[in-house]
Amino acid sequence: MQLNFLNEPSVFHNLQHRYSKDLIYCKAGPLLISVNPLKDLQIYENDIVTAYRLKLLDIPHVYATVNTAHSEMMKDGLNQSIILSGESGAGKTEVAKHAIEYLTSLTGGDTGLQRKINHSSCILEAFGNAQTSMNDNASRYGKLTELHFTSTGKICCSRVQTFFLEKSRVVQQANGERSFHIFYQLCAGATQSLKARLSLNAASFYKYLNKSDSVRIPGAEDERRFHTLVEALEIVGICKEDQESVFSLVAAVLWLGNITFTEGNNGQVEVVADDAISTVSRLLECSTHDLIAALSTPNIQADSESKLTVEQALASRDALASYIYVSLFEWLVEEINRSFEAGKGHTGSTISVLDIFGFETYSKNSFEQLCINYANERLQQHYNRHLLKLLQEEFEMEGIDFNKVHFQDNQDCLNLFEKNPRGLFSLLDEESNSAKASDMTFSNNLKQHLSGNSCYRSEQGGNFSVRHYAGEVTYNKDGFLTKNRDSLHRKSIQLLASCSCHLPQLFASKLLQQYDSSRKFDCLNQNVGTQFKGQIFKLIQQLESSAPHFILCIRPNSKQLPDVFEKEFASRQLRCHGILEVVRMHRCGYPTRMTHQEFVSRFGILLGDIDNVSQDPLSKASAILQQHRIPPTSYQVGYTRLFFRTGQVDQLELIKNKALDGALDAQKLSQTQYTCRQFISLKIGVITLQSFIRGENARREYSFLRKLSSKELLSIKTLQGNQKTVQLQSAIRGCLARQQFIQMQSAQRLGDEMAFSPKVFARETPKGLPQENTVVSPSNMQDIRVQLVKAEATLGQKEEENAALRQQLQQLQSKWSGHEAKMRIMEDAWQQQMTSLQASLAAAKNSLAADNTPAEPRRFMVSPSPLSDSEDTMSMGNQTGASSPRPCFGSIPESHTGQEANGKSAPLGHLAKEFEQRKQIFDEEAKSLGSHNNPEQQLRQLKLRFAQWKKDYKVRLREAKAKLRKQGHADMERSHRKWWGKKHRKQPTS
């Protein structure tokens, strides 16, 4: 929504209007504003995630900010940071969680790593979040999540950094607040067996938890969240044994709070021997005697043993409990980083998400609130620097005309904390290192050295107030020095080192390393304030090396109620973060800037004619802007940079994308045409090669056929004709057999129907004639079945004949292949001989007969043998049907020739002689078929003459037989009948 009037009421009305419609996100220039809805909204579902991932939605949302960060990382290769700021209870933790979840789904990569990253927040929330008066799920630590990406934009590893866990919450809480969630979740959700092993009771049983009147949060479901925590621990990779050790230490911290002390007759503090002391020693796996000694024995000072008071013993107990819990939290963070492969090398960029404790102010503020508010001051300075200060300073340096925007700078407040040697943290360290210092001396020291700072004000009773960017906060001086020292006695360290459990031993070994390096034997003064200031300083340095993206979270009301928007409460947050100034700067300024060379490198493709353009980057940049008619009011040219108003660079990006799309289309068309030309050329080449090969094969075949004799050529053609004839006959016989089989099947079905139906079939008769009923008799049915059996037998016989014919055809084809192979071998041998003969022509004159030798083998190879002729004749005879006459050109039967030789019958001898003469004539005519122009026609005429002679010859044989009967030659008649039968069987007629 574009505001017509830029003022506080207009901005406030816009936020309230959108909040009433559950539109919790809006943009204020480069800043994303998120108003905590304090209820569940359906704006983080899978369909919303998909829409933003596919760039289908671009309305203000945390997903849109993440998309911008990821796109800039991939485009520029720079590290990115997403910084969330706002008061406690403004919803920073939830927004950060959704940002990380969307990042893991956006980039893909290792799905196992994505699950670990998403479930790690559950572990850190359980051990690091607590209920406060401002927030039911307040982060009591700062967290920076680094996501490392490969050069292709996929997550390869991650790392979590934590800052300043509020350890004092372990042992005490304000009224209406709770300790860390894990204590209540463990007491509510542990199984019965786990409760028995840890000796767990209800949360209200433990003194560390029942000091406030808030034990359960309505709707918090501690039991369910404990089961979710156990699942998250398994996903991160913490084994069952380590989980048991973690829960044992948590239970030991609770039982430590139930240990009580009494003062003996000699004034020495004694530990009450009850269930608490024995349970703690069992959970820590240490000796009960060592535990009592660590809690009740003072440190040795000046070779004399001092006595502890009950208050000091309680403080020592609380310090041990706090240290165990903080060390356990740090160990969990290390295990999470180990599962994230945080030490794995990477070459890509990073996106960091900062979720740090929000600004806090309570009725009683102590050392923890001071550190938290200092961290927020530092982040606010980073916020002002990048959104307001740096941009205006750059405008001035580059000579850009702009309307200067004034904003509230918090540098004086930062000087109050950080100035050396008289800053607040320096004075606190000085007092903490002094044995005679107290909280009152510390307060007086602050009043003496900081009264000149406008952000400091001394209060009655030694308290002091600091004017922060979000308002003035009064701090109670009590406990400042003790919390800053964070001392742990040497005996407590020795106690942890003596435990059988590996985790306390690990915690003690880290302290002993610091102990050896510091060479202090009384206690370890860690100076928490100085360490925290150093951590924040390193954090800001890391953020400065990245491109920031700010998300401001607003708390809508002070009562944590949904759908309630308090005007003054929300307006105060908008004012302290300078929302109006940011919007004004964004509207009248030039938020996008880049160097001349960067602009030319990014949009140089838009420069058309460069002949008349100077080669320096400024001239090229100016030419690009003029060619595309960019209005001069939408940009300004600085000494080294170009400055653009909002949306102008996006317009240039659209122009560039269109140009790139056009170039891509042209490249596709050119590539398509080139590929088509290549294909056509290749196709022509293939066709030419095929034509050449076919021509070469045809020439070789023609050369071979020219060298064959007419008889050999006839044999080849006859064989080819026989093959085609066989194929045609096979097809015809198959068709006839199928038709016959179909007819028999129909007859069989009809017969079956008649057999199963005893009814009489009626036939229609013409009018006036009587009706007749025809009944198929059993004898007719039997005849039909006999015919069917005969037809099936005939069909089987035909199939056997077809198989025999196919076998003969295969034999002929194999012989023909053999002849061709031999012919090729002889042709090669002839070529070799011809070569040798041409080389030695002079020496070959005396042996002319050698010139004819190559041709003889070829005729021998290709000429058909008499066996082949007989096989061909038999094949032709077998191809005919059973009813057609079959010609036979074999020799005369022995019985016939014997009769003629003995001279027993003159007519028969005459007929036999005639048979031999005719046979010789037909053989000669068959051999001369190859010399005719149409041998097939000549063959048909020869067959016709043979059939006529055979018919006449049979008539004369019958006449000779009749004459013999008349003469009464009975014996010759029997001999003749015997001869006739043999001849008839050997020479079947066609």
Image: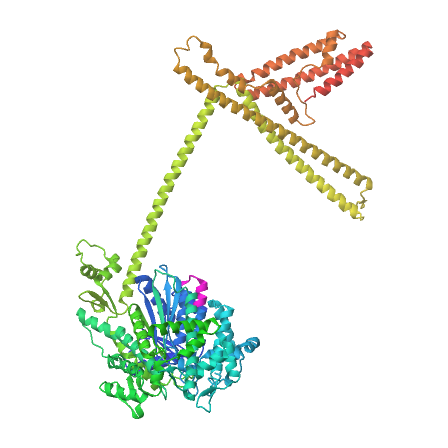
- Residue 69 appears in which quarter of the rendering? bottom left
Res. 93 visible in picture: yes
Q: Name the residue nearer the viewer: 122 or 886.
A: 122
Spot occupied by residue 962 in the image (x, y as percentages of width and height): 78, 13
**Which SS type dominates the magenta stretch?**
helix
Q: Name the residue nearer the viewer: 816 or 258.
A: 258
Q: Residue furthest front?
A: 303
In the displayed structure image, the side of residue 173 where residue 731 appears, left or right = right
- Count of residue discs: 0
605 w.r.t. 742: above or below = below
Spot occupied by residue 471 in the image (x, y as percentages of width and height): 30, 85
Residue at 41%, 64% (x, y): give it.
Answer: 341
Q: Residue furthest bottom?
A: 460
Q: Quadrant of the C terminus?
A: top right
Q: Which residues are magenta?
A: 107-117
Q: Name the residue nearer the viewer: 46 or 240.
A: 240
Spot occupied by residue 231 in the image (x, y as percentages of width and height): 50, 70
Q: Name the residue nearer the viewer: 27 or 960.
A: 27
In the displayed structure image, the side of residue 441 where residue 279 appears, left or right = right
In the displayed structure image, the side of residue 217 where residue 347 appears, left or right = left
Q: Quadrant of the N terminus?
A: bottom left
Spot occupied by residue 460 in the image (x, y as percentages of width and height): 30, 93
- Magenta-span inclusion, residue 560: no
State the scheme by which the image is colored: rainbow
